[in-house]
Each structure stands twice: as structure tokens, then as C-alpha cells.
Image (cartoon, rainbow, N blue to C red):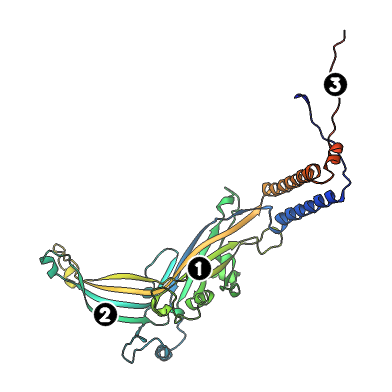
Amino acid sequence: MSMLHYITYKLVIIRDRRVGSIYYTIAVLIVLYTLAEIFVKKGYLEFDTSPEATMRLLLSDPKEDNSDNEQTSQFEDLSYCCNKGEPSKMCTPCQTMDARALSWPVESRTISLTTFAKDRWQTKNTSASSTGKLQQFETIREKLYFTVQPETMMIKIEHAVLATKFLRGKGGKDLAASQRNMKGYLYSHDGTTIKSLSSNEKSRLRGMADKFTIEEILQAAGVTSLDEPSDAFNAKGKPFRRHGIVLHMAINYQNAESTLLGTGDIEYSYHVRRIPYADYRVNEVIPVFNSKDFTNSSHVTHQENRLFRKRYGIKIEFHQSGRLGHFSLPALLLHLVSGVGLLTLTATIVDILALYILPDKLRYRRFVYEESPMVENKKKQ
């Protein structure tokens, strides 16, 4: 065969049920797969899987619906409080703290509240400085206590989301929404809906935030009570209330999963998970100033007293993620071209089977390959 030749193709019908069955079976599967990618998985949409989001968190006290006598009665009925008797290993006195005192430290996208604390009043050992040693604090007295019903505290959440991948520019409408005009849901750890958060006109006018009690968040994480034993390695059978607990609260945004075709309004959902084998504790140093520290500014004295507070409690870490989409012609064409490419690949595979593997491969080659005689242009004499 000459190097200078041209190869063209002709249509050959091979009347073999084996070859036909193989080809059409694979072709039907590819067509179904392509349709599923386009319509079921919405391949005609382009998604922003990392939208920008912002939030504001606030821990507030519960509504005071009960009288002082009822609150005192509830205080005495708490199993972990022993204000009447002597403190023991199984029972510790309780102390009432409001939301501002409970919430420490203040961090971005995190709510921390104290369930158990150790307060140590300390003074600096001034005699150590005269001997050239590093001054250390000595504990004068210590107080251990639980906080009263931290589960009743309420978290207020305001948040918004923006799909930065689809920014419209001047005059266009961005794919964005605020929690005030979205529908939301709080899901439990097993996928059931605990609470629905509607976005009606009344809540938008009042600017209402999402409100959850700590008890609801614990329920969503599958924790029925803070008095359950902690699974942290150094807990030694102590409950979550005494040793601390860490929760992961994710806010997920979507606008395509709740519609059959196309996209709808942006919705969000809360998903809470407890981080296993994790405890939570943090140390707080509260300076104690004397009146003489402010009397003469020219002679500033160093602080020699402090309150060292070791806090154990609940740490809730908030994370925002989402998958927001809109119609995209390039995405649709990409799936169509992929389907056509797979069909072409199927024809190539069937050709290899027919020409090189099946028993009648030699006979099929005679029908498929045909070579013309050599044609040369002769110059007229």
C-alpha cells in the first residue's frame, strides 16, 4: 500500500444479533445516563459550591414567664445542684449567671457558654521577686459551681448568602438572599425535621432572627441531656455538664433540590453534629484592681490580685456552605457533547469486537475493508 492514499468510510450492515445486541444495549444505557445527568441531576445548571455568607450570633436570656417563687423551686429541684447540703463529688452548688456572663470567650462564628466553673482567687507572691525567682500566683480560696439551666438560654442567628460566581454587575440581580426572606429548617441527626422557620411578611417587617434554645440544639445533635456521660478520653465518667461538649452547626443553602425542574427560591437548613471524644474548657483571667491603682497616675502599681476562672461548657461552632445554581447553556451543551462522545466510543468498541474478537471476524473484515485499484494520471503523448 502506498503512503499517499486516502481512507474514507462506507456504511456496512452486519446482520449479527450478537453484535447488534451489544451495541444497542450499551447505546440505550448511555442515552439514559445522559438524560439522567441533564434532567435528574440538572446538568443544565451551573452551580456555585462555595458562596460567600455572613452571620451574626447573639446569646440571650430566656423569657421570664415564671415568678420568682417558681424559679426558686426549679432551682432546688435540679439534680446537679446541692446548695442546701455540703458539696461532694457527685453534687456541687449552683450559681445563676445571665447570658453575658455565660458567654465567654466571644469569638466569630462561635457560641460558648459555661455549664461548670472553678473560680480561684489568687494573689501574687511578692516574696519570690526578692529572691530573684519568677513571681507566681498563689490560690487563696477556690469555688466550684454549676450554672443554673444553661439549656434554657436562647441563640439568635441572622445570616445571608451571596453566590459570587454569578455576580450580575450593574443593573443585574444577584443570586443572594437573607435569612429574613428564606425558608429554613432545623434537622435532627437522623434527618427528621425538628423545626420549620417560615419567611412570612410579618417576620420580615419585624426583622426577626432565627431563635433556638440550647436544648433544641442539643436535641438536634442527638444529646438528650447534659448529664449523659462524656466520651472524652480524660472525662473518667463525668457528664457533659461537668466536662464540656463541642457541637458543629452547619447552615446549608440550596435553590435546586426542592424543585423538580429548574431552580426556586433559596432555602437553608441547620444540621447539628456532636464532635465525638471532644471536651471543652477554657481559662479566663479577670484582673482585680485596688482603689489605690487609680489614685495617683504617676505611681502606677502592678496588679497583684486576680480571679482565675476555669470554664467548662458548650461550644457551638457555626459553618456556612451551599450549592446555588442557575441555567447555563454551556453546561447543557457539555453534557450533550459528552453523551455523543460516549456513543462514538461505543461504536469503536463494537467494531473492535466484530473485527478482531468474534468468531466471524475474518468474514466481517471482507465486508468492512475494501481497496480500490491504483489510479494514476498518464500524460498524453
Q: In the figure, is residue 331 to the left or right of 104?
A: right
* Mark nearer the N terminus (3 vs 2): 2
Q: Identify the element where label 2 is drawn.
A: strand
Q: Residue at the far left: name it.
A: 130
Q: Relative to the observer, which residue lies in front, 45 or 57?
A: 45
Point 85% across, 11% down: residue = 379
Q: Quadrant of residue 71?
A: bottom left
Instruction: Look at the picture and state if 210 lies above or below 44.
Output: below
Q: Residue at the far right: name it.
A: 15
Any mark on residue 249, and which?
1
Q: In the figure, is residue 337 to the left or right of 280?
A: right
Spot occupied by residue 277 in the image (x, y as percentages of width and height): 44, 71
Q: In the figure, is residue 346 to the left or right of 249?
A: right
| Circle 2: residue type | Glu
Instruction: Look at the picture and state if 276 lies above or below 66.
Output: above
Spot occupied by residue 220 in the image (x, y as percentages of width and height): 54, 74
Q: Of circles 1 and 3, which is in front?
A: 3
Q: Residue at the far front: name it.
A: 359
Residue at image mark 2: 142
| Circle 1: residue type | Met
Crowdedness near tag 1: few (<14), some (14–19) or many (≥20) residues, C-alpha within 10 Å: many
Q: Relative to the observer, which residue lies in front, 11 or 373?
A: 373
Residue at image mark 3: 375
Point 44% across, 75% down: residue = 231
| Circle 3: residue type | Val
* Mark nearer the N terminus (1 vs 3): 1
